C-alpha cells in the first residue's frame, strides 16, 4: 500500500549543534538528558548507516554503524553509542550521517538539567545529492 | 486578492521525530501533550492528503486521510487520529505525508509531562518534486 | 564592506504552525506570549513585504504590509498586527510572506502560559524561486 | 577514514532570529542565556569565516572573524564576540555567515531568564551556491 510512496530523503546529512547535557532530573530512561537523531528509511531497501562525530580539537570519531530495514525507523540517542567509542558528555560536537539508501534525519535534544525539561528539534541538513 | 500568491510547497513531506508523550500536566485540551502536523494549503485546489506512520519493528500504519480546502489550513494532532488505527503513545515513529496539491508542513510537539511545558518545532522535510 | 555579501533568501516564504498563546505569565513586553517572524533583508534594495494569514474555516486575512530597508531587519510579533485586522489569539493559522526583494524568514514562538516560558523556532519554508 | 565523506554545506548562511536574552538564572557558563551558531567544517580545507550582524536601525556590524580547521567544528556564542564590537543584549538582530569552505550552521538559543531554561534550535538558511 505504501509502495507508491517515493523514496524520500538524502544519503548524506549533517547536524551542527551536538551536545549531550551532562546531568539529568527525573526518571530514567524518558527524562534522561539526551541528543538524538531520528531516522526514517521510507525506501524499499535496507539502509546501512555510518555516523561520524566531529569535534573542536581532535580527529573525528566513528564510524558508528546503524542498520535500518526497509520502511522502518530508528531513533538513536547519541548517549547510547559506545562502538568504536563513547561521545563525551558536555562536549560540543557535530555529526555527519551517511546512508546506503535515502533517509530523513531529525535532530532533537531533551535537556533535563533543571527540574522542568527543555526541548529543541530541527530537521538536519541534507546534502542535495541529485 | 491572494490569487497572485504562487502555490508554495511540496506534495510529499517527511517528519523524522514522532513521539507522543504518554502523560500530561494541566488543563485539556490546550495543555495535553501532543505531536502535531500543521499543514498549509495555499493553493487554489482542494488537497487530498494521506499520512503514513512508520515504526521501528512493524509495517507502516495508514493511510490516515485528511482533506484541506483551497487556501485553508489544518493543524492535526497525531494523538487524535484513530482511522485506520491509533498511533500508540510513548512510541517512536516517523511520518510521510502525501498530498494531491502542494502543501507546507510544520511539525510541533508540546510536552507537558512536567509541570512546565516544553515546545519544539521544525519545518518538515519536503521531497523536491520539481 | 558588506556589499560583497550576495543577496540571500527567497521572495516567498511560508510558516505552517501559527498560534498565538492566549495568556501570558511575567513582565511585558518581553514575557508576553507571542508568535514572531524574524526577517532579514540582506539585499541592497528596500523590501516591500505582504503577509497573508490562512485559517481553517475562513478566507485568508491580509495583506499585512511591512517595509524593511536595505541591509536591515525586522522582527514582527504577529500579536501586534492590526491592519487590516487582528490575528485572533488561541486560533490555528499559517502564513505566506511575499517580498519585493530576497529575504530570510525565521518563525519563533514564546509561550509563557505557564510560569516558565517555552520556546520553539524554525527557519520558515522558502519557495525556491530560481 | 572520513576522507570519503563529501564536503557538505554551503559557503553562505543566514540566521533570522537573533536575540541574546539580557538576564540569566543558574551557574555560569552552562546556564548563561545565549545565542549560538554551531558550525561544522567537514571539508578537507581550513575555513575562514566572516560573520555579519544586521540590525533594525543601524548599519551591519562585522565582520567577526572565525577560523575552523579541516574536519573540525566550532560552537560560537554570539555573546562572546567582541571584535570589532559586542552584539548588544536584548536587541533584535540577524546574521549572515560567509565561509571560504563549505560549512553547516545550526542556530540555538538557551534562554534562562526564568528559573527553568528554554531551548530553541534550527538549521540556519543556506544560500544554494551550486
Image (tube, coloured by chain):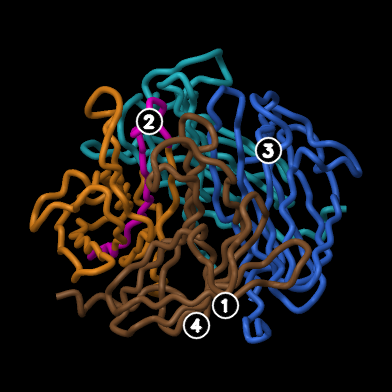
Chain colours: A blue, B brown, C orange, D cyan
- The reply to whether label 3 and label 2 mark residues of one chain is no
Residue D78 visible in the current orientation:
no
Is residue A73 on the magenta stretch? no
Quarter of the image containing the C terminus of chain A? bottom right
Q: Quadrant of residue A31?
A: top right
Residue C85 visible in the current orientation:
yes
- The reply to whether label 2 and label 4 mark residues of one chain is no
- Please name the residue shown 83% across and 57% down the image: A66
Describe the element under mark 2 as helix, strand or loop. loop
Mark 4 to mark 1 CA distance (whole Å): 24 Å
Mark number, residue B63: 1
- The reply to whether label 4 and label 3 mark residues of one chain is no
Describe the element under mark 1 as helix, strand or loop. strand
Pointer 2 residue: C114
- Please name the residue shown 40% across and 66% down the image: B39
Q: Looking at the picture, does residue A84 appear above or below residue B115?
A: below
> CB atoms at circles 3 and 2 under 8 Å apart?
no
Front one among C40 and C4? C40
Q: Examine the residues drawn in magenta and state their main secondary structure.
A: strand
Mark 4 to mark 3 CA distance (whole Å): 40 Å
Amino acid at each position: 500500500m505504501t509502495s507508491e510512496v517515493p523514496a524520500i530523503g538524502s544519503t548524506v546529512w549533517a547536524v551542527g549543534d551536538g551536545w549531550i547535557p551532562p546531568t539529568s532530573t527525573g526518571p530514567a530512561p524518558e527524562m534522561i538528558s539526551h541528543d538524538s537523531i531520528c531516522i526514517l528509511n521510507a525506501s524499499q531497501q535496507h539502509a546501512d548507516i555510518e555516523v561520524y562525530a566531529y569535534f573542536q580539537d581532535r580527529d573525528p570519531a566513528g564510524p558508528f554503524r546503524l542498520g535500518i530495514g526497509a520502511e522502518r525507523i530508528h531513533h538513536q540517542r547519541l548517549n547510547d553509542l559506545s562502538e568504536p567509542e563513547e561521545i563525551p558528555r558536555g562536549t560540543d560536537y557535530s555529526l555527519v550521517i551517511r546512508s546506503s539508501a535515502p533517509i530523513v534525519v531529525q535532530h532533537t535534544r531533551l535537556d533535563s538539567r533543571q527540574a522542568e525539561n527543555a526541548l529543541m528539534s530541527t530537521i538536519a541538513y541534507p546534502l542535495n545529492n541529485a
